[in-house]
Amino acid sequence: MASRYRVEYALKQHRKDNFIEWIKGLLAVPFVLQAGKPSQKEITKEKEQETLERYARILKDVEHLIESHIEQTAKGQQYSQLKMLVPTITSFWTPLPLVEALYDLEPKLCLAKRSFVAPSFNDVRTILGGAQLRYLAQNCLEMVSFDGDVTLYEDGQPLLPDNPVISRLVQLLSKDIYVVILTAAGYPSRSGKEYMDRFSGLLQAIEDTDLTDDQKRRLHVLGGESNYLFEYNPLHGLQWIESESWMLPIMKTWPADEISEILDSAETALRSCINALNIDARIIRKERSVGFVPSLGQRLRREQLEETVLEVQTTLQLRDFSVPFTAFNGGNDIWCDIGDKKLGVRCLQYFFAISHPSKCLHVGDQFLSAGNNDYKARSAATTVWVSSPSETVEFLDYYFSHLPYQP
């Protein structure tokens, strides 16, 4: 329940993805033109096809705008037509075959059959995700990183053997794709025990498969956003990788005293919110993070969580630190980590010698909620936004279904 509540709250009207909202507005026009009265509920095949074609024409225009935006951005031009229409738009790493995704997903979405519910935020999000995966299936995907909570497993739960996502992760590994669990959970112990316990179902499945040792070694865990990297070793499980070999050069220059100052300031803000908002929680301070967790059996109110994370963010932003940080709402706790998932993805690209962001995919659920730690990955890779572990499974199956046939 907590996981669904967290995602639904993040998708409320007060937090918007302007690009998705813009497309939703465009699709509202053909919907209004075909919307009927209750007595006209039966939509003929001809009418349904006509409506679907109207949606497709709009999405084809959006495809052209995206392609033009990519070309102009590559030339260093500051403003494209898409940028003028949606000023907050940033980078696209690949074209998006939106029309093909629309026709693929119409049996599920039933957009053309609906008379009373217009194309929604989630409909557009699904089409965008499908389009991104369709493109990647036809091109060379080299790495997929996944958020943990609400993406691979329910909030706060381990990755158990019966989780259907496990077989899909193994399938990715079998295609020589790097698979990384890129989680905010930060456990600095070199033994990796905490991660091995949490991901035991996946590790056991990999041990029992007929994957080659090289394919098994393509599984990694990057914890604390961008702080602790482990690689699967067929003989020893998760094995610690020294930061000197994978951290970006700029990260190695971060002043230790500034890192301490960030965590001190965040801790002060957390304590202030605990007192002011009557939060029953305890502070936990780690090497590269600080946060609070509720007392045993307590559920924190979403307003307490959102107020706290915004307080921490504002406090740190006013200090104008040079070291990046991420303050985020974990569903029933608050954390502030040194680094972020954009850096995490870039570290992985550096470590795996991946040449371009278009060859990487990040899958996550936090693209709108306060802290939006998955959102930052958009600056380093293609992304797919999911709302639950079951949707992650659906999207991966969609990706596999569009891979080129290999006899």
Image (cartoon, grey):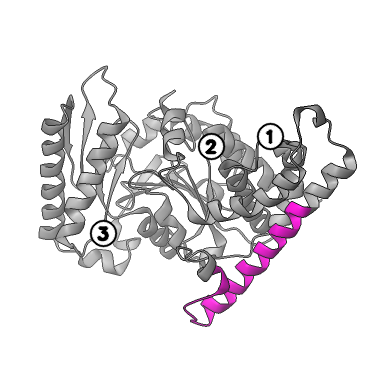
- What span is in magenta? 54-82
Q: CA distance from mark 3 to mark 2?
A: 34 Å
Q: Residue at x 27, y 17 (%)?
A: 297
- The spot of residue 90 in percent (x, y) is 47, 65
Q: Secondary structure at mark 1?
A: loop
Give, as a three-letter code, the residue at label 2.
Answer: Ile
Residue that mark 2 sits on:
206
- Mark before the other along the chain sequence, 3 or 2: 2
Q: Please state which of residues 178 and 127 is positioned toward the viewer in this rendering.
A: 127
- The spot of residue 101 in percent (x, y) is 71, 51
Give, as a three-letter code, the residue at label 3.
Answer: Pro
Q: Is residue 60 magenta?
A: yes
Q: Is residue 255 magenta?
A: no
Q: Residue at x 33, y 36 (%)?
A: 330
Residue that mark 3 sits on:
324
Can residue 401 be seen from the camera position used here? no
Contact between marks 3 and 2 (CB within 8 A): the answer is: no
Residue that mark 1 sits on:
116
Q: Residue at x 53, y 34 (%)?
A: 389
- Quadrant for the N terminus in the image: top left
Contact between marks 1 and 3 (CB within 8 A): the answer is: no
Q: Say whether residue 188 is left or right of residue 105.
A: left
Q: Say whether residue 7 is left or right of residue 99.
A: left
Can residue 373 be seen from the camera position used here? yes
Q: Which image quadrant is residue 137 in?
A: bottom right
